[in-house]
Amino acid sequence: MSREDPEKGYRTMPMFGRDTELKDLAALVESPGEHSGILIQGEPGIGKSTLVAEAITTAVAARLRVLRTAGAEAEQNLAFAGLQRLLFPLRRGLEALPARQFEALSAALGMSDADAEPSPYLVGLAALTLLADTAAEQPLLIVVEDVHWLDPASNEVLTFLTRRIDTEPIAMIATARDGYRLSLCETGLTMMRLGPLSGDDARALLDHTAPELPAAIRARVLAEAGGNPLALTELPAAVRDLTDPVAALPLTERLEDTFAARGGTLPADSRTAVLVAALNDCAAVAETLTATGVLLGSAVEPEILEPAVTARLIAIDSGMISFRHPLIRSALAASAADDERRRAHLALAGMLDAEPDRQVWHHAAGTVGPDEQVAAELEAAAERSRHRGGAIAALERAAALSATPGRRADRLLRAAELAVDSGHRDTADRLVDAARTLPLTAGQDATANWLLSGFEDGIRESPSRIGELAALAASVAADGYPDAAMRILWGAAMRCFWSEPGPDTRRTVLALADTFGIPDGDPRKLAIDSIIAPFERGEQVLGHLRAHAATAGRDPEVDHFLSSAAYQVGAFDLAAHFAGAAAPGFRSAGRLGLLCRALAIQAWSLARLGDLAAAAPIAAEAAAFAQETGSPFMHAVVIAVQAEIAALRGDYPQAVTLVADAERIGLAAGARPVLATVQLTRGLIALGQGRFDDAFTDLVRVHDPRDPSYSLALGGCFLTELAEAAVRAGQTDAMAELLRGLEPVAAATPSPALHIGMRYARAVLAGDSAAELFTDALAADLTGWPAERGRLHLAYGEWLRRQRRVVESRTHLRTARETFDALGFTAWSERARLELRSAGESSPNRSPDAREQLTPHELSIAQLAATGLTNREIGQRLYLSHRTVSTHLHRIFPKLGISSRSDLAALLPADGDTPR
């Protein structure tokens, strides 16, 4: 049976040959939250909407509330148009949202006058909260049709939602045409691909829709329809008029020709009204009638649309016009003459004074040739846009209407800059290529050259680009733009982080940075200095970092630069401090790209300090955000950290798997920090398994300039592990030579990590005269460095036992055991126990810490709950719904042997209670 689709206002096709698909959709809507959503893909007319209509019927029978939206070609430039249609029925629930979420979502939906562009991720979190709260009262079915035509802002938010509704009583069904790249494909939705109907099903459908068709015409329809259900229902009436050339067209074009021919039979005034409706980005009948009246020179009544309704081209319901199929709308617009379309657009523009953003697009569509006034209006619309995708489109259209090549290039490059900021590489490439076809000024050419370098920190580029960027920065600074010059120079510095350009290039970049007149204490300058010259500028940078420490938390961007600087100079305690201060600001603003970087630095630093319990959930969150924001190299850094954590905990199979994944990404692009962390982890695995020769070989690679894992800054951060491996592998001479090479560096910088490693290495290499060196090393300030203190106690205890000072050794070995037990360093904990046993003291069996029984994701939720945060507050921090948090907590409690969140605080002490 066919049925009326209440949303689209037309009869959907009867179902033939889709039994399996119907069962899958029924299973989805009958058990929301138990299955992933479904993305239905296929060519136009293949039956996607018919399946959706059947699923909606099933959902309504199962008492689900249905929320619908659809992409529309005419609305692709209107930010959040698709999301507005989806959430408008829930608008009264916005007031219950947390303040920042309310502000973001109300701005996105056009319900407030906020000027700032709302973060798509914050909008997504608000939408998730709203949907989860609604679903708690009644399960939901979300239907998103024609995803390929969704405006970019809505698409981004829906992608965010799809990744997070798996634990909610929410089902999602989306549809899209074949041939489009869709971000929804990467969210875990089940793909349902619709192919043509079988011969028997096609014949059954044709017999149902056109039972009186003569045999010859029936055969031709079957042949030309090719199993497409829409063609089988629409071609019978038109097949007699199809000529051979038309029959050779692709099926979509044949259907469009059929619909265009049907539109051509309408009275002239009705054709004009339907054309206006097809071009209008609003479905309101009143708006279409007003614009039609302008075109015809007198007011018109709704009856002007009746012939189109009778011809089954449109439907009208509740004062809104809907087209029976998207192909009808595109066919009617395409079949009109160019002048007719332009006049219709201008008529619509003339009545939209109160909606300038819609008005300017109709003005632009009705404009032929350059028009600087309309271009300027589009540029202004770009500035007002609530999403960068809309701003990019407006600037690109403004460029096409620009009166001079210079203005065209300016607008193309500005659009490209926004594309870079949004992470859309393909769009930025296309826009820069278009600008380069024009005669560019020196400044424009320079902008084009550095714009694309913003992707992935230029990691895939030749190191020679570093010098080019430095020269460009100098030119921009000389023109009086020091802030812009610092931005470009930051790009050059980041390339020095990921790759190794050599000392000459580093000196050139550093000298240029010193000429910009930026104060030495400026966080940007500190970050650049620390990356380019971590040892030469280490003392100066550390002094400023300590001065800034008391003011952390005021500005996340400042804290981010400071955390990067601290990381580079080996002050991992400060790096974790600043990164932890930056994260809340980025989180609350929905800046997930920068949040990912802050979390990565925090996790890397905490792992080096030995706070695995804190590092693990942070690394897991960073890894998820890196994937979501399309940051493969940040993802590689984070999974290398996760591998390090697994190795320290003694989970060597997991560490091996993770380190292989990180190395695969790092090797492909020569990402040295990734590869250095990979070698650290391999060394830790080998140390834990007693393969000391392998450990030394793995770790010493970081110090070899010819090796892809060589890292100027990080080489001095793994000296403790390297010295331990060297002593046990009999490589003390090689280690002593390496230390001699580092002595001048150590004399030039107070880098905490370097000096802690140097003191440890000197002690373990000193042989019988090591006592004073161990004492000096332990007397240093190791506040916040528990792992390094534990290693020193272990090494000193081992040395004392070998010196037959057994009673003295026990104190240090006991301290090491307790430290490593608390930190979860399994292999080192067992070593301390073995040494204590040899020293005549037994040790109690180590009880696994509660944190080790949870996954990193569960641990992050449990730790936040232990601080007293509500489920809703936890959800806001982790970009989850509060119901998802509740679900996780109910899984966590049995693992920990507790029954309520009030017991969590005792099991999961705050970071400050972890032994240091």
Image (cartoon, helix red, strand yellow):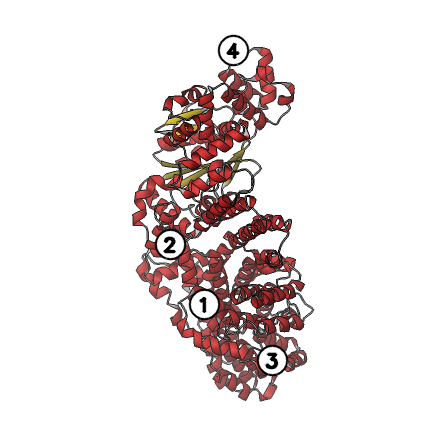
3D distance between C-alphas at marks 4 and 3: 92 Å
Instruction: Give residue 516's position: percent from left, percent from top.
Output: 55, 71
- Which residue appears at 64% of the width and 67% of the height? 500
Report the residue marked by disc 2: 875
3D distance between C-alphas at marks 1 and 4: 76 Å
The answer to whether marks 2 and 4 mark residues whose Cβ atoms lie closer than 8 Å is no
Kind of residue at badge 2: Gly
Q: In this view, does 765 lie above or below 548?
A: below
- Which residue appears at 53% of the width and 84% of the height? 774
Kind of residue at badge 3: Val
Between discs 3 and 1, the one toward the N terminus: 1
3D distance between C-alphas at marks 1 and 2: 24 Å
Residue 656 visible at all: no
Instruction: Give residue 578's position: percent from left, percent from top.
Output: 45, 69
The answer to whether marks 4 and 3 mark residues whose Cβ atoms lie closer than 8 Å is no
Name the one closer to the observer, 448 or 881: 448
3D distance between C-alphas at marks 3 and 2: 46 Å
Q: In which quarter of the image is residue 276?
A: top left
Kind of residue at badge 1: Asp
Between discs 1 and 2, the one toward the N terminus: 1
